[in-house]
Amino acid sequence: MTAPKEACVAARVPVAEIRQRIAERDSDGDIMAIIADAADAHNLTVDELLGYCREKPNVMARDAVWAAMYELGHWSLPRLGWLFGRDHTTVLGGIRRHLKRVREQAA
């Protein structure tokens, strides 16, 4: 059973602040393009992806974004964590989950 949407609202860093952090560092639009593509692929809005909801589609999309940005090489784990209002170990766990899913789908 999935949690009601109200359970997904408890945010630490407001989504508006996360959007502001991204906008300040996204001069060429690459970050928002990655986020928008992942949100579309998982049938989510950008705000749902950036939020703190732990429903599976949200988490999978977030993990994919973190993995894509980390692969670009411009973003360290602590920097990604700060950008998305998370701890760097949360980002690392998300990247590992994403890579595991990719390997399992390829097999």
Image (tube, rainbow, N blue to C red):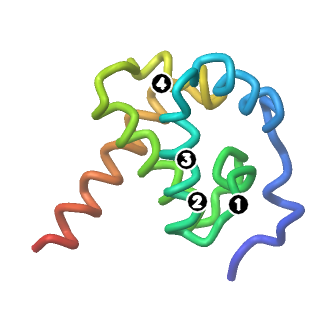
Q: CB atoms at circles 2 and 1 under 8 Å apart?
A: yes
> Which disc, if any, is residue 39?
2
The CA distance from mark 3 to mark 1 is 10 Å
The CA distance from mark 2 to mark 4 is 21 Å
Residue at disc 2, secondary structure: helix
The CA distance from mark 3 to mark 2 is 6 Å
* Residue that appears at 22% across and 72% down: 105
Query: Taking 39 as reference, is 66 above or below it?
Result: above
Count neighbours of disc 3 (C-alpha within 10 A) and say few if under 14, some if 14 to 19, many if 20 or more: many
* Residue that appears at 79% across and 32% down: 12
In the image, 105 versus 68, the foreground residue is: 68
> Which disc, if any, is residue 35?
3
* Residue that appears at 31% across and 30% down: 72
Instruction: Name the amino acid type tagged 4.
Output: His
Q: Nearer the viewer, mark 2 or mark 4?
A: 2
In the image, 102 versus 26, the foreground residue is: 26
Residue at disc 3, secondary structure: helix
